[in-house]
């Protein structure tokens, strides 16, 4: 007789940002701790969980799309439990039950740690709505529930106090709460002991790290401590930065500590003062430019990436052209472009969403194309040089090659025998495209 695994199973998909991914790893750990086994398809799972995002309409549509396909599953197996977790649970609350009556649990951003208990309660044939605010959270995840062996994200703070007029994050994640530096160090060391060589610290406005702790903690002090106390790490990165809190100490820290990445994600959103004001970003075009200038004084070769929102309410062609000119002026290494979508409860929801969809599409395309060319031009200048690459694994597009990134977050492909994953390799750069560099190892 063959013995069958009688343990209950769960399926979990994370659909949001990196912070959301870390929280979903915590959820996976909790479920495994409660005796569930993880499976790869919702169709074979007793519990189906989606860890959702609300930042744009498209993100929410994707979740409802997934839920639509689960209607059949629920008809065939009424005992299966379907749960919505994360930001969309927090922002939509019981509206999710109305739109998708086959959902059993809605678990918000401060109750995810109790996921296993909540799933059990739902099993008694009850719908569960757990969306209270203000619950103290731990960061106590099972670090072995990671998907990547050599690289890991570490959440150093939660929430956001900025309330940009377009953004739902302050509503879904609450106010800024920093984790103690000792707590962060402890997790980083445990990750290091588990084989991690690259960490990326996470916060929505990571430059404000520590300001709420009243113990003098700051981002640059935290980076220096990690650099000094965890020598086995090869790379230390952090996202997302906001120009208003860029300190000289932070710039100097990036310049002075060789294992800290020379890459900053510094979203600008728009190049027009009029639009920036209405977005409540808290800086003008000129102030942003001066923040970049200060950074580049200390770190001349700093690579910068940014986010743009196109089609924000009232964005005229003249406003858009200001974004285009700022893109040129800063010469970013990379741009992420988003078409504006109104988010419930935000201030901008009251502004008429008046830029037509095709026009948003066009502006999106213009910035992306320009950025592609600018990235390509930057990469071509690097040909003939050598990149020090931290190898991440096989290239997805070419099985014969390995892929990794340098300290400037540039992707490099190269062929090599053995398995160099998780190590540093010097690659002589022989060519490039608009999205990556390639070459051969220096021997
Ligand atoms: N904390 C980060 C961004 C978090 S959201 C920061 O302050 O920059 C990630 C990106 O999504 C934002 O930078 C913005 O470009 C985009 N975004 C946020 N809300 C949006 C909305 N309502 N419509 C379109 N894009 C949006
Ligand atoms: Fe959203 Fe602005 Fe906070 Fe970033 S800083 S998370 S865009 S409110
Ligand atoms: Fe992240 Fe999306 Fe929430 S960007 S913080 S998962 S709304």
Image: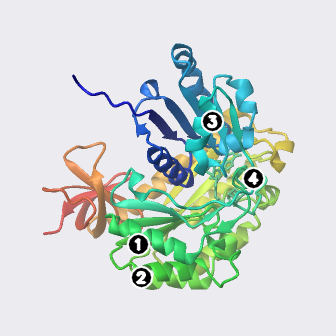
Q: Which numbered disc, 2 or 4, marks the residue closer to the eye?
A: 4
Q: In the displayed structure, does residue 159 sit left or right of residue 42? A: right
In this rendering, the count of numbered labels is: 4
Q: Secondary structure at mark 1?
A: helix
Quadrant showing the N terminus: top left
Q: Secondary structure at mark 3?
A: helix
Q: Earlier in the sequence, mark 1 or mark 2?
A: 1
Quadrant showing the C terminus: bottom left
Disc 4 CB within 8 Å of nearest ligand 3 atom: no
Measured as percent of width and height from the top left, residue 225 is found at 48, 82
Measured as percent of width and height from the top left, residue 371 is found at 51, 53
Q: Earlier in the sequence, mark 3 or mark 4?
A: 3
Disc 1 CB within 8 Å of nearest ligand 3 atom: no
Location of mark 3 (residue): 121
Location of mark 1 (residue): 189
Residue at 56 percent across and 46 percent down: it is 16
Give the Cα distance between marks 4 and 1. Answer: 31 Å
Q: Earlier in the sequence, mark 2 or mark 4?
A: 4
Cβ atoms under marks 1 and 2 closer than 8 Å: yes
Q: Earlier in the sequence, mark 1 or mark 3?
A: 3
Q: Which numbered disc, 3 or 4, marks the residue closer to the eye?
A: 3
Up/down of 256 relative to 267, above or below? below
Q: Which numbered disc, 1 or 3, marks the residue closer to the eye?
A: 3
For residue 161, which quarter of the picture? bottom right
Location of mark 2 (residue): 229
Mark 1 burial class by Cα count in 10 Å: few <14, some 14-19, many 20+: some
Cβ atoms under marks 2 and 4 closer than 8 Å: no
Cβ atoms under marks 4 and 1 closer than 8 Å: no
Cβ atoms under marks 1 and 3 closer than 8 Å: no
Q: In the displayed structure, does residue 192 sit left or right of residue 299? A: left
Q: Residue furthest front?
A: 1
Q: Earlier in the sequence, mark 4 or mark 1?
A: 4
């Amino acid at each position: 007789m063959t013995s069958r695994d009688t343990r209950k199973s769960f399926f979990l998909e994370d659909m949001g940002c990196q912070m959301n991914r870390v929280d979903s790893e915590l959820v996976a750990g909790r479920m495994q701790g409660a005796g569930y086994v993880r499976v790869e398809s919702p169709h074979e799972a007793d519990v189906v969980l989606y860890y959702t995002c609300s930042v744009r309409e498209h993100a929410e549509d994707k979740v409802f799309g997934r839920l639509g396909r689960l209607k059949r599953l629920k008809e065939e197996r009424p005992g299966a439990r379907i749960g919505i977790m994360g930001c969309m649970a927090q922002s939509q609350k019981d509206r999710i039950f109305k739109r998708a009556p086959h959902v059993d649990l809605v678990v918000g951003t401060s109750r995810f740690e109790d996921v296993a208990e909540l799933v059990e309660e739902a099993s008694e044939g009850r719908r569960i709505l757990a969306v209270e605010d203000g619950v103290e959270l731990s960061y106590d995840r099972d670090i072995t529930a990671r998907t990547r062996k050599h690289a890991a994200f570490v959440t150093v703070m939660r929430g956001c106090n900025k309330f940009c007029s377009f953004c739902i994050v302050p509503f879904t994640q609450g106010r800024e709460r920093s984790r103690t530096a000792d707590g962060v160090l402890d997790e980083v060391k445990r990750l290091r002991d588990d084989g991690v060589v690259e960490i990326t610290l996470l916060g929505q406005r990571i430059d404000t790290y520590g300001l709420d702790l009243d113990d003098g903690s700051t981002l640059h002090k935290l980076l220096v401590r990690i650099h000094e106390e965890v020598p086995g790490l090869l790379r230390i990165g952090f996202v997302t930065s906001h120009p208003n809190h860029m300190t000289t100490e932070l710039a100097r820290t990036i310049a002075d500590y060789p294992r800290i990445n020379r890459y900053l994600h510094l979203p600008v959103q728009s190049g027009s003062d009029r639009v920036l004001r209405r977005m409540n970003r808290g800086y003008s075009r000129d102030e942003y430019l001066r923040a970049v200038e200060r950074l580049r004084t200390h770190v001349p070769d700093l690579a910068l990436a940014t986010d743009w929102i196109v089609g924000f309410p009232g964005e005229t062609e003249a406003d858009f052209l200001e974004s285009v000119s700022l893109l040129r002026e800063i010469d970013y290494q990379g741009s992420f472009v988003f078409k504006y979508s109104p988010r419930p409860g935000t201030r901008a929801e009251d502004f008429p969403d008046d830029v037509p969809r095709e026009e948003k599409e066009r502006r999106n395309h213009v910035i992306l194309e320009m950025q592609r060319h600018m990235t390509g031009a930057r990469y071509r200048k690097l040909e003939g040089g050598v990149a020090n690459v931290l190898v991440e694994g096989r290239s997805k597009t070419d099985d014969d090659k390995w892929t990794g990134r340098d300290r400037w977050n540039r992707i490099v492909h190269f062929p090599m025998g053995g398995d160099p994953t998780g190590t540093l390799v010097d690659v002589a750069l022989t060519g490039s495209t608009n999205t990556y560099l390639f070459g051969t190892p220096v021997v």
